[in-house]
Amino acid sequence: MTQNIYDNPEFFAGYSRLDRSVEGLEGAAEWPALKALLPDMRGLEVVDLGCGFGWFCRWAREQGAARVLGVDVSEKMLARARDTTIDPAITYLRADLERLELREAAFDLAYSSLALHYIDDLPALLGRVHCALRPGGHLVFSAEHPIFTAPANPGWSVDAAGRKTWPVDNYLCEGPRRTDWLAKGVVKQHRTLGTYLNLLLRLGFALAHVEEWGPTDEQIAAHPSWAEARQRPMFLLVSARR
């Protein structure tokens, strides 16, 4: 079963204070780049894997999606999502993505934001997603970049020029990695960039776009601290078609 860290009170309190939790999609640095990968939403049947507070579910409906299913393992996240959603075309389901069953050919778009790096059996989940998409359907997701999930302890150092550097630890050794982020003992699944992409190809997806996200000059001007993300990419963004 997926580690349900989001129902940990300490983690949930910290996560609720993040910009992406307070401001929604616009508070997520990678959102403009991720949004550019999405198809025209009008009339689409959409599933959001790891929907959290439901920000994307509501946005998809505002853009004309016909129906949206938001799935998350966290009771606390879903409670917030339901409290802030008044739309009968949006349904929220509590389910472990490791065991999630989806109807065959039921969706035009499967979307996931920063959830897949928590999944142990990713091949099984993405295989079910492939079956749940209609021919020509879209899969768009973000995950923590593999360089970000394989940091060496203590994480970063400072070079002779005073810049932060992040050595990578056993990059090719895939599997669970424990980290302390908002709470102690958060488990993320490290896998290489090649593993992500070859898995999609093996399942029959056609890759449309792969991006190792970094902030634009305009974003850095507005948020100078984001410049650190140019030292190593924080996010992997992928668009694929069934």
Image (cartoon, rainbow, N blue to C red):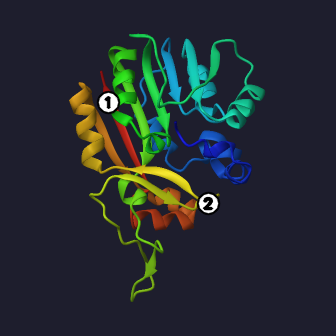
| Residue plotted at (41% across, 32% down) | 140
What residue is drawn where x is 39% and y is 89%? 160
Residue that extends furthest to the bottom in the rendered view of this protein: 160
Q: Amino acid at mark 1?
A: Ala
Q: Which mark is residue 184?
A: 2
Q: Crowdedness of circle 1 by 10 Å Cα count: few (<14), some, many (20+)? A: many
Left or right: 48, with 139 as reference point: right
Image coords of residue 194 (percent x, y): 24, 47
What residue is at 40 percent from the left and 29 percent from the top?
Answer: 125
**Which element is circle 2 on?**
loop
Q: Which residue is mark 1?
A: 240
Give the structural element (helix, strand or loop) at label 1: strand
As displayed, is residue 82 above or below residue 192?
above
Amino acid type of the residue tagged 2 in the rendering: Lys
**Residue 177 drawn at (x, y percent):** 44, 56
57, above or below 222, in the image? above
